[in-house]
Image (spheres, rainbow, N blue to C red):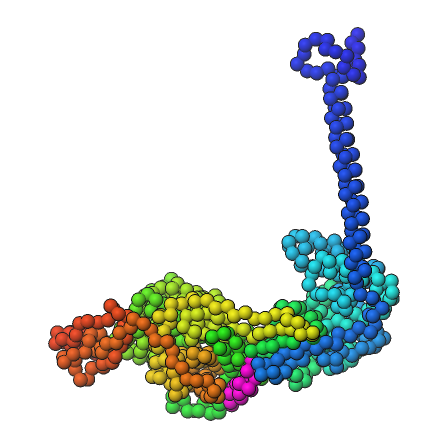
Amino acid sequence: MIFRSKQPIGKIFKSSSKSVGAARYTRNKKRNFWMNVFKKIMIGSTVLGVIGVISGSIFVAYISKKLPDIDSINTYIPAETTKIYAKDGTVLAELHQEENRILIPIEKISPNIIKTVIALEDTDFYKHNGINIKGIMRALYVDIKAMSFVEGGSTLTQQLARNLFLYKQKKIIRKLAEMVLAIRIEKKFSKTEILEMYLNQVYWGHNAYGIESAARMYFGKPSADLNLSESAALVGMLSGPELYSPFRNFSRCKERQKIVLQRMKKLKIISLQEYRAALNKTLVLAERKKHRYKAPFFTSYVVEKLIEMYGEESTYTSGMNVYTTLDYKLQTHAEEVVKKAIELGEKSYWIKGEKVENLNFNEAALLSVDPRNGHILVMQGGANFKDTQFNRTVQANRQPGSAFKPFVYLAALEKGLSPGTFIEDNPITFNTIEGPYEPLNYTLKHLGNIPMTKALERSVNVVAVKLNDLVGPEKVVEAARKSGITSPLKPILSLPLGANEVTMMELTKSYMTFANNGIKVNPVAILKIEDRDGIPLYNHVKREKRVLNANHVAALVEMMQGVVNYGTGRGAKLPRPIAGKTGTTSDYKDAWFMGFVPQMVTAAWVGNDDNTPMNNVTGGWIPAYMWKEFMKEALRSVKAQSFPRAQGLVTRRVNWETGLLASEYTPETAKVTDLKYWRGSEPVEKDSSKSISKVKKVRQQKEKEENELLDFFDIN
């Protein structure tokens, strides 16, 4: 018989395996070890938990002492007005005026609004005591996953507390304070009272506070009469009142309305039939009253900047004083210039032998900036702000046409080519991946051998495309990027003709770099912001950076002066040094004039928002007229100033046909002009009888080939 003990009693004989008792002992020993570890972890966790609870309680108690008294909630009205000033002190806007809030009892608020706001903002409103643990955990999960504050998880009561007493920024301390206040509010007031206060306090965009002012502003009716469709649209706006405003972006507002209605259908608050009826019901907006902003395109631009900096609530309620760069006198003049341009477009004209009833454009824009400091002096983003708040100086992406060509010539100058370098303007076809590409001149004619400076003056497309191919489209893109263009640019052959879309603001910024001799300064609208007590909150600091070689820019600007003095921009000429460039797209969808003096860069544009082609409107016509009319007034008190001269350029008198220095052999009929070259690259050989004879032979050969081609077509 073999005796088996629960504990080992000694080794009986050698064996490769342990006895049963030994194995059981080992298992017990391991189990006891892990039990001890587990106990220590539990004790440690408990201690840490207790410490955490005590610390948290102390922290919450500390925060609670510093929180405002909720008894003031019934009398709280955000009465501080934010004021925006022009450079001369003119008040451009007063944000949040008290008439934009109409307090009403909950009995006068449509049930549609009440059930809609609860469905979207706080489904468990009637179940929680101020905070919703489930919502907080869900928001915490989303925030951790995104590694940032993405979702708030706030109840209506928390939102009310935040709107009344706290800052908008998502900070942990603010969140804890918000929760404490929400619990206190729930203890002090009933659910109905909380809902009434919330609906009377919440911001609904365009300076409208509370549901009553929102209902009257957007739909021209009291909130008691709001239907389900209108209620869903309004509630959908709460996460971004200015962003989802139907006045600013109707389609975006409708998208939010659909999300709200889908949520209500999912919660079975409304039926499928009610969902479809509300979604398909036409939203009839109230006619907007005359905008209270002065210089509304610029002022709205400033308001958007303030919202980016401080949030909507602070922008409209904190009582800030905002000092801007706008020259209000010039702004009113710009508005008149744009108005006159629209009127010109409505007249009939004879164009190329045909009478057109109008020029077929209904929009225009004008932007003017000081290139030395970036101050935006004028911003007229359209014909009429009341008709559309779309700001074409910053929001519209348009093809610049030939206004993009200076970047090509800049890249050519950087490569070592001179203003006097000759390029052949003749028909050419490029083989590309997309197939043959043949650039055409606006006139459909060719000028033969032509110096770069004259090709820019006359805006010769073929020469610009040839230069682009010569220096490389990537270099042209690089020149544009350095100057200030930020929109996507494809390095393609048609790049010089403005095939890529840009905004007026970034095109102006790049021309500012030209006017500022290669030093880039970003445009700025806000100079200084003070709080209600005059304490500085923000002061603009000018930042400038040299991005282009001063000599290359000086040479380019001299060439661009020729555009105004002798070329396509003659319609903008004034009795002082001016540089500029016209821009016309091949289909007449856009027409530009970009012009500048050392102290001011001004952009003028005409076209249609729907990209409908105009009737042969070029940049040298209506936009050049706009530019000249504006600048005559703008430069009245600005001293005429010459642009810096390029160093290292030498002047030579050259025969265009031969590209050689004029001499006694040069025919009297030859085109001879003074041209500029970088020292060391200028022509040194003079015209000779042999060079003149060679040119004649080449010309005769071309004429022969053309005649043979004509004979061929006549025969066939």
**Percent position of residue 90, x then y:** 61, 84
Task: State which quadrant residue 628 falls in.
Answer: bottom left
Which quadrant would the C terminus be assigned to in this image? bottom left
Instruction: Specify whether 390 is left or right of 479.
Output: right
Examine the structure image and report whether residue 334 is included in the region drawn in magenta. yes
Magenta stretch prevailing secondary structure: helix
Asked whether residue 79 is in view, the answer is: yes
Query: Which residue corresponds to the image point at 44% horizontal and 70% vertical from the top-left?
Result: 519
Q: Is 413 drawn above or below residue 713 in the view shown?
A: above
Examine the structure image and report whether residue 545 is included in the region drawn in magenta. no
Query: Which residue corresponds to the image point at 50% horizontal and 78% vertical from the top-left?
Result: 369
Q: Is 19 drawn above or below residue 317 in the view shown?
A: above
Instruction: Specify whether 525 is left or right of 512.
Output: right
**Percent position of residue 249, x then y:** 63, 74
**Percent position of residue 427, x then y:** 29, 73
Asked whether residue 380 is in view, the answer is: no
**Percent position of residue 676, x then y:** 28, 75
Query: Which residue corresponds to the image point at 75% horizontal and 28% vertical from the top-left?
Result: 33
Task: State which quadrant residue 655 falls in.
Answer: bottom left
Which range of residues does the magenta coloring cover?
A: 326-343
Who is closer to the viewer here, 648 or 198?
648
Q: Residue furthest left?
A: 689
